[in-house]
Amino acid sequence: MTKRTRFVFGVDLGDRTSHVCQLERRTGAVEMDEKVPTTREDFEVLFKAIPKSRVVMESSGSSPWASRVARAHGHDVIVANARKLRAIWDSPRKNDRRDALVLAQLGASDSPFLCEVHHRGELAQQRLAVIRARDLVVEARTKLINGARGIVKTDGRRLPKCSADSFHAKTAEAIPEALAPALRPTLVVIEAMTAQIHVYDKEVERLGRKEYAVTQRLQQIPGVGPLTALAFVLVIDDPKRFAKSRDVGAYIGITPRQDQSGDTDKQLPITKCGDALLRRLLVQCAHHILGPHGKESRLRIWGLGLAARGGKNAKKRAIVAVARKLAVLLHAMWTSGEDYDPARGANATKAA
């Protein structure tokens, strides 16, 4: 809001109830301190009744819809990065009431340590639910397939190798008769899951074709399919909020952690701060780019050069580095509107 508000509300979001603290900005006096059920209906009543104020809450599973409800009633909403609020999670006296008070105090002081996060739009959130639901079904099917193979092994036999899509058809006859009552129903469930995954895939392709046309251009990169392209667009949501394409790698959490002090500069794993599903999809794409079926490009040459340097984890690091470069390339193509160029994506070197 362009005008400083008189009151600041700190909202500590809970699973069932949330603690709300109202702070008078000028005096620092606590005007309200109460609990509210964490439901849309109760939040609508709360934010409609209070005067136009600044509302501060931590990022959580409920913060996307809660922040949208507050903004709909004209409030200035700040969703703070929960990882960065050390004053809350590292406090020796941590409770919901105090957490709400600390959020209100930080909001009243205009503290830069709130580290405001960006929530994607409601439509993007709903579209992304299709991809997340598909991922849940794929994960459940994988567990069932591995479980079925393990049960058959206990009988001294093995099920034939095959893809997950054809598992229910190619292993039906290989199940021992003694285990048929236990595993035949499992195959029925796996077949139903496979059919549902195909339904999700068709919906992903439809969304990319009809509603998110930019995904068609992103799929020009070998190894990037409809699923990864759509997930990237939906998770990023607004490409203009990144000043540089290189910032996308840090946002997704595929940049190394840092712990440097004086002459000590430790080599640490990646931060894993961003969306885990998108990070996993980009790593899968990197596997394809560096694999035997990957097409020649500067990105592939650069990644193979990293992997060839040797060392215990050289290949793993190369895959993560290619995934990071791929995220940067996807964002650059999105913002520039340019088509894919195999000579783009990594700095060429004589060694490569």
Image (spheres, helix red, strand yellow):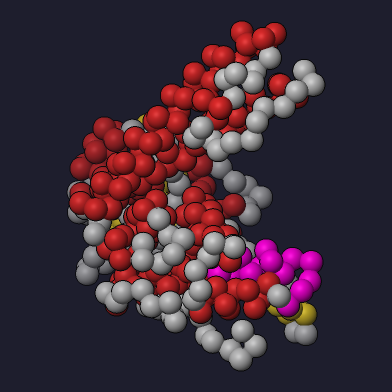
Q: Picture coordinates of residue 76 (x, y %)? A: 27, 58
Q: As displayed, is residue 291 above or below residue 262?
A: above
The residue at the point 49 percent across, 43 percent down is 97
Q: Residue at x 24, y 53 (%)?
A: 209
User: What percent of the width, then of the height, locates residue 109?
Assistant: 41, 67
Front-lying residue, 294 or 5:
294
| Number of numbered markers | 0
**Residue 258 is covered by the magenta coloring:** no
The percent position of residue 232, horizontal first and vertical second, equals 39, 58
**Is residue 24 toward the left or the right of residue 145 in the image?**
left
**Residue 77 seen in this snapshot:** yes
- For this rendering, which residue is in front, 154 or 92? 154
Along the line of sight, the residue nearer the viewer: 101 or 209? 209
Residue at the (57%, 20%) spot, across then down = 172
Q: Position of residue 228 (x, y in %)?
A: 42, 55
User: In the rendered image, which quarter contains the N terminus?
Assistant: bottom left
In this picture, is 150 found above or below 70?
Answer: above
Q: Is residue 108 above or below residue 184?
A: below
> Range of the magenta residues?
309-323
Pick the front one: 123 or 19: 123
Residue 109, relative to residue 76: is it above or below?
Answer: below
Question: Left of 101 or right of it: where is 91?
Answer: right
| Prevailing SS of the magenta stretch | helix
Residue 310 counted in the magenta span:
yes
- At horizontal 61% and vertical 84% (from top left) the residue drawn is 352
